[in-house]
Image (cartoon, helix red, strand yellow):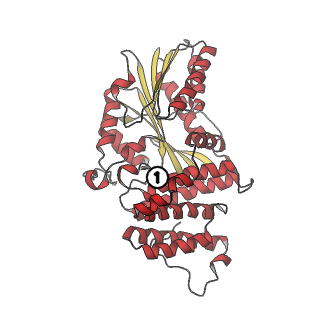
Amino acid sequence: MYPSSSSSFLSSSSPPLEALKPEERGLHLIQLLIKCANHAASGNLNLADECLCQISRLASLHGDSMQRLAARFASALAFRLVKNWPGIHKALNYDTKRPKLELDRARVIFTKAFPYLGFAYAIIARTLLQAMSAERVIHIVDLGSADPKLWAPLLQSFAALPDGPPHLKITCVHSNKAVLEKLGPKLVKEAEALDMPFQYNPLNVSLKELTKDMLKVRSGEALGFVSILNLHVLLAQDDQADAQFRPKKSNIDVKDCKQMGEFLGMVRSMSPKVVLLVEQEAHHNLNHLVDRFIEGLHYYSAMFDSLEASFGGLSSSSEERFVLEEMFGREIENIVAWEGVEREERHERYAWWMVRFSEVGFKPVRLWLDSMEDSKKGYKIISQRTSLMICWNERPLYAVSAWTC
């Protein structure tokens, strides 16, 4: 789909940039972006600047999906370049001038506009119910989602079990105290309406700060963990000092990450009945800028195409569309512009997660999925042995997997 970094540009006899047809413009933008990434990686700032000048003539935050995508990647490259001069970067007041991103609101819009998380929530709820239906005391740890759209239906499902509702405790780990305070009353109210014994345990810490003692797991509790688009932040590390590739046991290179290994080891030590994981089906945990830049173009082009399909009938200035594109733009910026421990958007494909989970003693288990309309408007779920891929036009974008001891 994309040319390599050595792809040639349009010839000098080609029409002016502004006269290019959409397909020609899209191809030219991809070529310019990859060339600019190569210049940025090699430190050739003058040539990178020339590329950005050409990109700015073609890209637009209010154009078609390719123009919008190009604008986000160009902005990320520009930010990376400016960061080379800390004084200039600080004087520009970059962080105070750009729109404030309300990540939790963006997630709500994302869940409403697309079926990706809806599919994932249905799979998680069904799998948890199958794993825990015979248990009378259940403790589920939510590693950062805090979405009532996941938990309220699950409470209803547990309450409807033939033997009556179990005692359910949900521990929610989140770095935003306001999110925890908003979720708690909703779940307590739902449990009271269902006459269900329920306990809500909020933990206002990040995943990096979480310890085993904080979870207060009691003897006799059937324990489960759920992580939705959050676990990859634990892969952030000083790549120069920490990253090593382990001896190959398969066809993939998996970077050692002490922080991730210790976290998964901690979870494994508590002998959970099931651990459910949802992650981006992409590979952005690469040391070389150009490699992860091209991976990012592949992945986010599909995301922006699905945005175009969902919002295409609306005005191109739709506020909800802009909020989502800003959310993805921040992810792109982190992937492209940052390095070391500050680069947290280190998405890895399911095959990499399989290695990481297996190494600490987990094994994959079956995922359960009720029949649903899973091919509407280009969206579908594809089963790949021990995982389920949530796709847009056959392109896997999110992977759901389940693990046990």
Is residue 102 left or right of 366 when viewed as pictured? right
Residue 356 lies, with reference to residue 36, above or below; the image says above
Residue 389 lies, with reference to residue 299, above or below; the image says above
The residue identified by callout 1 is: 282
Which residue is depicted at the point 37% across and 71% down? 42
Residue sitting nearer the eye, 42 or 365: 42
In percent of width and height, residue 151 lies at: 56, 27
Residue 155 visible to the viewer: yes
In percent of width and height, residue 335 lies at: 45, 55
Q: Secondary structure at mark 1?
A: loop
Which residue is depicted at the point 66% across and 76% down? 18
Residue 305 lies, with reference to residue 181, above or below; the image says below
In percent of width and height, residue 358 lies at: 33, 39
Is residue 61 left or right of 38 when viewed as pictured? right
Q: Residues within 10 Å of mark 1 (few under 14, many from 20)?
A: many
In percent of width and height, residue 55 lies at: 56, 71
Is residue 143 left or right of 325 when viewed as pictured? left
Based on the displayed image, in which of its 4 quarters is residue 10 positioned?
bottom right
Residue sitting nearer the eye, 100 or 361: 100
Which residue is depicted at the point 57% across and 34% down? 122
Residue sitting nearer the eye, 124 or 284: 284
Q: Quadrant of the C terminus?
A: top left
